[in-house]
Amino acid sequence: MYTKPSLLPITQSIQDVKASLPPKLQAPFMTALRAFTLSWSLSTLPGVVSVLVKFCLALLQHKPNKISLVRRLLFNQLPKLLKNSIYQNGFPWLVTGAIGSHRFVRYLLEQWSLSLRHYQLLGDQVKKGNSNSNSNSNKNDTQSEASNGGGDGDSGNKRLTLFVSVVATMYLVKRLFPTSRTSELTSFTLFRAMDVYAHRAYLSPLVARLVPAWTLKYGSVIAFTLFCTEIMFSWFYVPSRLPRGYALWITKVAQMDERLILFLRAVRNGTFVYGKDTGVDDLLCNYCVDIGMPFESGLSTRGRVPCRLVHNGQPWGCEVNALTQFVKVVTKVFLLYFTVHLTPSLLFKRNKLIQNPLSSALHILGASARSSTFLATYTSSIWYAVCLTRTRIGHQLLGLDQTRLDTLGPFIGSAICGLSLIIESPHRRGEMALYVAPRALFSFMERLVNPWYYHGRWWEPKVAEAFEALVFAASTTTVLTAMYTDKDMVRSSVRGILGWIMKYELEQEKAGK
């Protein structure tokens, strides 16, 4: 006789809690649970994996303090990490509240409204001297109205409840987790909301008549180019405007010696002047020795710095250097992009991968090669633009002032590197534009706000916090409303994640239509 397998204890506990809730709150409960689980995993599992890797390495090492190291990792660092992930990490609470709290708030408001209505009816019946049976009848009518969903209100009230609940969530997270950074999630949500409006504009007949077709087709490339201009120019000259981790990642991919970057900054701010000894010659002279060039090649008093120095000592010209950089990046990032394109197939398209292994493998390899080519073109175009501006055109053809060329080159490289996105597929273009958009906004806001904002005035942090809360709430409301009403307006990557989180709610909404 077949017996249904028993559920795991934690699964059974979840089912018990869900069953104990009113029917209207069962789907929102699962949404909140899934939102917390996913966001907690994203913010915590990398640290857990890091501790476990250190633990495995400690077991393999032959050191006298191996046991104490293992004990510290397992019984000190790991428990502390897990504890902090709940009590000091505001990210999962913010995500959970933003996605899952509005249904609970709406339910409480409905119950409060029904209670007020019931007591009002009771008061009217007492004044009129009606019997208790009539009063009970009215009470049953009120409860029947609640069960039929009469308290849901119109879509405007739903959006307002959603907006207010997100604002309240941001306020509470800021108070309970003051060290948690929320700006990156706010920027991410803002651009995802803008993407919803972009999808609507793309499908609008009015926009199709007024806007040239090529701008709609290549809008992601145009946006990506503008964003990258801001990001890369900031990386060259004011990297503090960028998120620290992102700036370090760019430095790693660019494979550019820090002294060369410091030289470009010194030229721009006037501390390195051609033809004058300003006391910073050791900056480039030591670099010249390290790459096999004469010490004197880095002296500012000798005039123009040769392009060979920009090429890391490679003597075969600007074009060969650009090609070398291209090959380096392709070989370095191909495996990374192969993993990026393989993972979705393993997680979400396993049946297709099993049924058509050859075509799936060719598709993954092609996508990986295309993405690797994009990043290699992105990087090498910056290198070649610098050389083309400061040497081939600016110096050899036009004979322009070298100080100006050494600043103009990085700017032109920053401006044209984004055009390499045209190599990617249309779907990936949009995703890449949305990926860099928050970083560009971060840099732009640092450029725009810094001159007048940080002056210690009492109202500055309050205004900034209120503005962030309003932006986050408006953006979240836009994206979630689109998921409820027309989820095709949400880009597939976000739609897939939110679709999994909100699975039970979306099914409930669909069944109620």
Image (cartoon, rainbow, N blue to C red):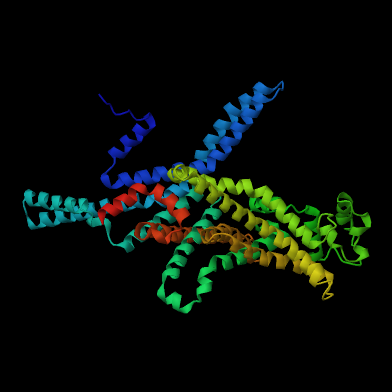
Residue 89 visible, this angle: no
Q: Nearer the viewer, residue 141 or 126?
A: 141
- In the image, residue 80 lies at what x, y percent? 56, 33
Instruction: Indicate whether 318 appears above or below 176.
Output: below
For image coordinates 75% across by 69% down, the residue present is 408
Q: Is residue 442 left or right of residue 404?
A: left
Q: Nearer the viewer, residue 109 or 2?
A: 2
Callout count: 0
For image coordinates 21% across by 50% down, the residue present is 147
- In the image, residue 426 lies at what x, y percent? 52, 62
Q: Nearer the viewer, residue 353 or 381?
A: 353
Q: Is residue 105 left or right of residue 451?
A: left
Q: Residue lying furthest bottom in this view?
A: 210
Q: Quadrant of the C terminus?
A: bottom left
Q: Quadrant of the N terminus?
A: top left
Residue 86 visible, this angle: yes
For image coordinates 88% across by 54% down, the residue present is 288
Q: Is residue 383 left or right of residue 455?
A: right
- In the image, residue 351 lies at what x, y percent? 43, 43
Q: Is residue 203 left or right of residue 104?
A: right
- In the image, residue 242 lies at what x, y percent? 65, 57
* Residue 65 falls in image quadrant: top right
Instruction: Indicate whether 223 appears above or below 84.
Output: below
